[in-house]
Image: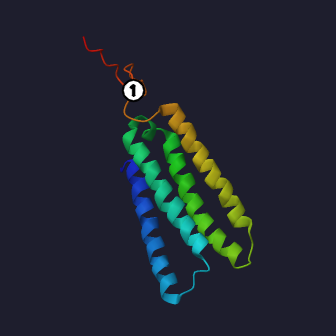
Amino acid sequence: MKSIATWFLATGGFFALAGMVWGIQMAATHDHTLAPAHGHLNLIGFVAMSVFGTYYALTPRAAQTRLAAIHYWLVTSTVVTLTPGIVFAISGRSEILVQISSILAVLSMALFVFTVLRHGVGKSTVQESRPLYPQTQPAK
């Protein structure tokens, strides 16, 4: 089974590829009407998922929790509903999907903040006692 960090990074890469293809299509047709949806696909789908994946790669203790898997599915659900939700809103259809997925996006980020505060960053949650900037001894 792949690690949660791998799932975040691979899924983020898939969303980046989709965003690139969509960007090429918009450029070729000179129709950038759906650029906000394209931007959110890239921002949450690639950038945020890559940041989350990197965090879980650096913090194995957090990656091994059930909450990490919930986080993955929550973010993935956000991207696959937010992108079409923005398309529907721009095209004058219903805004309900974008409203629901916006709540999912906030919950995803709140869960990330909770996880970072709970587990810290890195392999150990124990902070070293050495100072950030070591004291220098005065010259004699």
Left or right: 5, with 34 as reference point: left
Provide the residue designation for mark 1: 132
Q: Which residue lies furthest to the left in this view?
A: 140
Q: Where is residue 14 in the image (x, y as percent from the top left)?
A: 42, 66
Left or right: 88, with 24 as reference point: right
Residue closest to the eye, 94 or 129? 129
Residue located 48% across and 32% down the image? 119
Q: Where is residue 106 in the image (x, y as percent from the top left)?
A: 64, 51
Q: Position of residue 39 (x, y in %)?
A: 55, 68
Residue located 26% across and 15% down the image? 139
Say which amino acid is labelled 1.
Leu
Q: Where is residue 91 in the image (x, y as percent from the top left)?
A: 69, 79
Q: Residue furthest front?
A: 140
Q: Residue furthest top?
A: 140
Q: Which residue lies furthest to the bottom in this view?
A: 29
> Which part of the image, by quadrant, shows the C terminus?
top left
Residue closest to the eye, 69 or 15? 15
Left or right: 13, with 43 as reference point: left
Where 103 sits versus 114, above or below?
A: below
